[in-house]
Image (cartoon, helix red, strand yellow):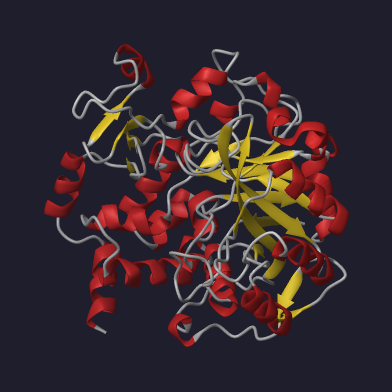
Amino acid sequence: MDYFADLHIHSCYSRATSKFSTLPYLAGWARIKGIHLVGTGDFTHPHWFSHLQSSLDSSDSGFHRLKQTLLPPELADYQPREIDVRFVLTAEISCIYKRHGSVRKVHHLLVVPDFDSARRISHRLSDIGNLSADGRPILGLDSRNLLEIMLEEAPAGFLVPAHIWTPWFSLFGARSGFDTIEGCFGDLSREIFALETGLSADPEMIRRISALDRFTLISNSDAHSPQKLGREANLFQTGFDFDSLKAALRFPERGGYGGTIEFFPEEGKYFLDGHRRCNCSLKPSTTAELKGICPICQKPVTAGVLSRINGLADRPRAMYTETDPGFQCLLPLAEILAELAGVKSITPRVRNGYREVINRFGSELALLKDVPLTEIARQYSEPLSEALRRLRSGKVIRQPGFDGQYGVIRLFSEAEVKKHLRAGPTKLEKEISMLTRD
């Protein structure tokens, strides 16, 4: 079957996450987004693990169903297309350790099929650090040794280096990572077969590095609230079970993996170099001319993902193998509706419009990717149809992010938005207004 999976998320037990990051809300928002499989996140946290055990029906398939499937009351007005949402046990581990005289800070995603595997891993890790302090525990554990623990305690599972280009906490991070997979995992490097692109990179950038050709590229939301699910995701075209998912990633030449849904990498927080405090963003060529020094404060800038990839790339442009499945960059629907409404934040007006669009077309991913544009124009509005035409063709206006500040992707110029708003309310805006009055 064809299904979308978002494997990297966080629960309410991780720092800086929504109190609504619980299984019922995650399942409800997965249906709204059009996602069939969601990572649980945080299985190493004792309280979250207990909640997972009591709330999920274990399954031999490795994909677990929520026992209580009713939508939370706050989502009762949503009527998305029915999806049999399942969960797979996942956790992110923050490894901070010294290697070759340097401090390394690398995040990893663990994916396992059953509660016994998760329990064994957590038992081993509890001897190393405090798993109750954070859903994403910080451990003084070498990445290679974490991989070894996973292979010993959950041989059916797998480890994926997370958001591999983030400057501060990733395998290839400019500030605390490595230059090669082998430098990080040593003799166990062959056990790594997939890498997570992260929000500030996409396959077009990563496939400039020939040393990474053998790795399958995945993307996930790293959501800290249920509403962020699916901002990046993976398409599978295989059996709906753990073994089939793992095989599709490990052996892409056999088929079964359909590629990724990506952020436009410029929207990520670390695309360009710069200093957020100085409101200074720099292209890699400018950074090189300035020898890495901020022209405002005269301190070293934070190197962005584009610079880091340029430094490791051995090709001027991407090269794909026959088994590369491709990818598509999309924008969250709420951001599109906010732009059409002429506002910069997700207001109640936009939220009401979002709900109406979901109820009309079934799910967010279906609307963004698949619903015919003529149908959108006929059933809803021509501006929304035009916005999605531009999105699907990649014709967007990009203001890149840098040094922890998200970038901005727009579908219309400011002049076009003003003209649209002066023209009077569209069908979409009239319906939003009616809903707001209710």
Does 325 sit left or right of 352 as displayed?
Answer: right
Tell me the quadrant of the picture where the N terminus can be found: bottom right
Horizontal and vertical percent position of residue 261? 56, 46
Q: Residue at x 75, y 26 (%)?
A: 322
- Looking at the picture, does residue 41 appear above or below residue 298? below
Taking the view exactly as shown, the residue that stands out farthest to the front is 101
Q: Reply above or below: 427 against 248.
A: below
Q: How many marks?
A: 0
User: For this rendering, which residue is in front, 24 or 414?
Assistant: 24
Give the image location of residue 358, x and y in percent.
46, 67
Q: Residue 84, percent across and down?
A: 69, 72
Which picture quadrant has residue 436? bottom left
Horizontal side of residue 59 vs 362, given as left or right: right
Left/right placement of residue 106 relative to residue 429 reads: right
Give the position of the C terminus as an image quadrant: bottom left
Which residue corresponds to the image point at 80% horizontal and 45% vertical from the top-left? 248
Residue 229 horizontal/vertical position (percent):
52, 61
Q: Is residue 7 visible?
A: no
Q: Nearer the viewer, residue 376 or 285?
A: 285
Q: Is 220 above or below relative to 195?
A: below
Q: Quadrant of residue 284?
A: top left
Residue 38, placed above or below residue 332: below
What residue is drawn where x is 77% and y is 32%? Answer: 186
Q: Which of the two residues, 127 or 17, is positioned nearer the viewer here?
A: 127
Residue 346 visible at all:
yes
Q: Residue at x 80, y 71 (%)?
A: 115
Q: Nearer the viewer, residue 45 or 158?
A: 45
Q: In the figure, residue 315 lies in which quadrant?
A: top right
